[in-house]
Image: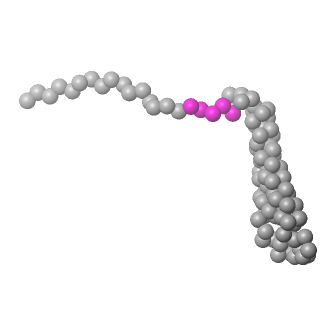
Amino acid sequence: MSVRRRALLIGFLGPAIQSVGIGWEVLHVLVSHWSEPLSARHFFYEPPFLLIVVGFLVTVVCIPVSLEVVKASEEEVAIPVYGPEPVEAQPAVETSE
């Protein structure tokens, strides 16, 4: 994956979470709160609104990370592949009894 595509994915993670929360909130208000007014409790404890807040917090963290990824070279962001260390042949130990 290219560095630019990786940075875009990191940068759009927070707004994607926020958009899911906004869509859920709109649907929730249209279905559940059509006739009754919204209270302050709704905005502090309902899951859709909390998802919007989490999306904002993820955005605050991910935007600087994505900017650092854009500045980095391909070698700096390469994911290292670890494998088992090669086993060296050990000389046979002779025991004399």
Question: Where the N terminus falls, by quadrant?
Answer: top right
Which residue is found at the position 30% from the left and 25% from the top?
Answer: 90
- 97 up-or-down from 37: above or below: above
73 vs 91, left or right, is right
- 65 up-or-down from 71: above or below: below
Which residue is found at the position 83% from the left and 64% from the top?
Answer: 28
What's the magenta bit mostly, secondary-structure-wise?
Answer: loop
Closer-to-camera residue (23/10): 23
Which residue is found at the position 82% from the left and 75% from the top?
Answer: 41
Which residue is found at the position 78% from the left and 60% from the top?
Answer: 51
In percent of width and height, residue 55 lies at 79, 55
In percent of width and height, residue 52 lies at 82, 59
Q: What range is drawn magenta here?
A: 77-81
Report if residue 42 is visible in the image: yes
- 29 up-or-down from 56: above or below: below
In percent of width and height, residue 10 lies at 76, 42
90 vs 78, left or right, is left
Q: Is residue 79 magenta?
A: yes
Question: Where the C terminus falls, by quadrant?
Answer: top left
63 vs 94, left or right, is right
Q: Is residue 69 magenta?
A: no
Report if residue 68 is visible in the image: no
Q: Quadrant of residue 36?
A: bottom right
In percent of width and height, residue 2 lies at 74, 29
Closer-to-camera residue (38/77): 38
